[in-house]
Image (cartoon, rainbow, N blue to C red):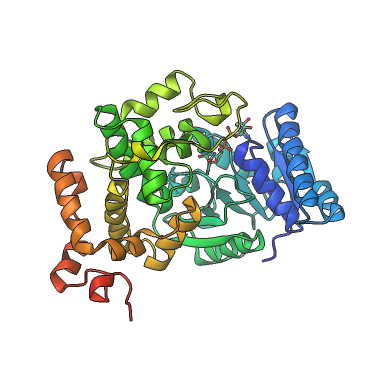
Amino acid sequence: MEIKKVAVLGAGAMGHGIAQLAAMAGMEVNLRDISDEFVQAGIDKIKWSLNKMAEKGKISQEDAEAALKRIHKFVSLPDAVKGVDFVIEAIPEKLSLKKETFAEVDRNAPKHAILASNTSALPISEMASATTRPEKVVGMHFFNPPQLMRLVEVVRGNKTSDETVRVTVELAKKFGKEPVVVNKDVPGFIANRCTIIGSNLVHWMVYNGEYTVEEVDAAAIHKAGMPMGMFGLLDYSGIDIAYSVAKFMEEREPGFKACPLLEEKVKKGELGVKTGKGFYTYPEKKWVPLDLPFEKAEKFDPFIPVYVGVNVAAELLRNGVASKEDIDKALKLGFNLPMGYFELADSIGIDVVVQKLKEISAKYGPFYKPSPLLEEMVKKGELGQKTKKGFYTYE
Ligand SMILES: NC(=O)c1ccc[n+]([C@@H]2O[C@H](COP(=O)([O-])OP(=O)(O)OC[C@H]3O[C@@H](n4cnc5c(N)ncnc54)[C@H](O)[C@@H]3O)[C@@H](O)[C@H]2O)c1
């Protein structure tokens, strides 16, 4: 099946970027939002982005203009999905809203069309259950900003067909992306799941007064090479998005308790860069790199979220959710990390990771107990680079 025409639902932060990718890949795009004003705002951002690309010589002026012409504005949902081969939903992260939308799309889109959701964490299988074509419903999870970030997680719901996964993987490649397949619809999929559980623990540590936001970010930047820091990254991508993922994880993941730190920010309307204030302030509502002194980096161990993330990743691997290569790829491309968690674990030492997890779980509870896979590796002496075998082998 060749994808010639797509509909993108929602022209916000993600939707406009996804529409731009499809248009740049030569497809006709129906971009839909709930008011003409919102669709136009999305189109204006696309225009700006295409012009910037042309200015930088990444694409020609003619290609930029042609891509823009392939994008069509819609407010009526039935009209937007008429005659399309593929629908990508990027509306707000609310399950009831997504289910209603999927049901309406199902009634109006051609029978052959695949329906994808860009949800960060909601269950694909539930959205699929609102349609008469669950085998054609799939997760297509882009990262922000979609024009630049290379990762796309292609998520199987419990009824998604192999063909739907194959077509979605191919489409992501046509968009110039690097797809990874997530075989089970686990909360948070790969990249977010591996990071949110560790991040949430750090939020608790800050909430409980063990460290300050600046101490955590200075350590993340200076000692772990995270370009934006942990809280800076939250400000950049939107605290409300992370909050809804955390709340959702709390509902679906036994043992996960969302730290109130994010909720307090959301209640105050301090959502990050887009509102001008989050954990830091942004007078121009634009991202500015954090300038934190090295001295602040001393106290916090920026690998705490990594030990926890390795544990989560090990459980994904043990449960057949994805391959170790795809898990590492998702982390590197999704968060611009220099190494994946398995590569990091091999360089830190699996025995060290297990020891740290034991210390963490002694203090913060059994939720952080080391995965049986990690314990097994330690028993077998597969400790990583120092024994030439861990998750990977070394010469
Ligand atoms: N922002 C991120 O970093 C990010 C990353 C990956 C995935 N996502 C996911 O993408 C989705 C959209 O997030 P966003 O950040 O673009 O949100 P956003 O608020 O910027 O945009 C959502 C848009 O959807 C529109 N909308 C509301 N109801 C609609 C409907 N019924 N039909 C069509 N449009 C409707 C809104 O008017 C708005 O323009 C969410 O599911 C989110 O979890 C976000």
**Residue at x-position 40% and y-position 54%:** 190
Taking the image as drawn, is residue 121 in sight? yes
Residue 187 can be seen in this image: no
Q: Quadrant of residue 206?
A: top left
Residue 319, horizontal then vertical, whole percent = 29, 61
Q: Residue 193, image x and y in percent? A: 37, 48
**Image quadrant assignment for residue 343:** bottom left
Quadrant of residue 63 within the rendered picture:
bottom right
Looking at the picture, does residue 270 appear above or below residue 128? above
Residue that sits furthest to the bottom in the current view: 395
Q: Residue at x 41, y 37 (%)?
A: 293
Which quadrant of the picture is home to ligand 1? Answer: top right
Residue 248's place in the image compared with 117, above or below, is above
Q: Residue furthest right?
A: 62
Q: Residue at x 40, y 53 (%)?
A: 185
Vertical comparison of 101 with 161: above or below = above
Query: Which residue does the image show at 41% across and 32% down from the upper left?
Result: 243
Quick check: 297 left or right of 379?
right
Please state which of residues 69 and 75 is positioned toward the viewer in this rendering: 69
The answer to whether 237 appears left or right of 107 in the picture is: left
Comparing 122 with 256, the one in front is 256
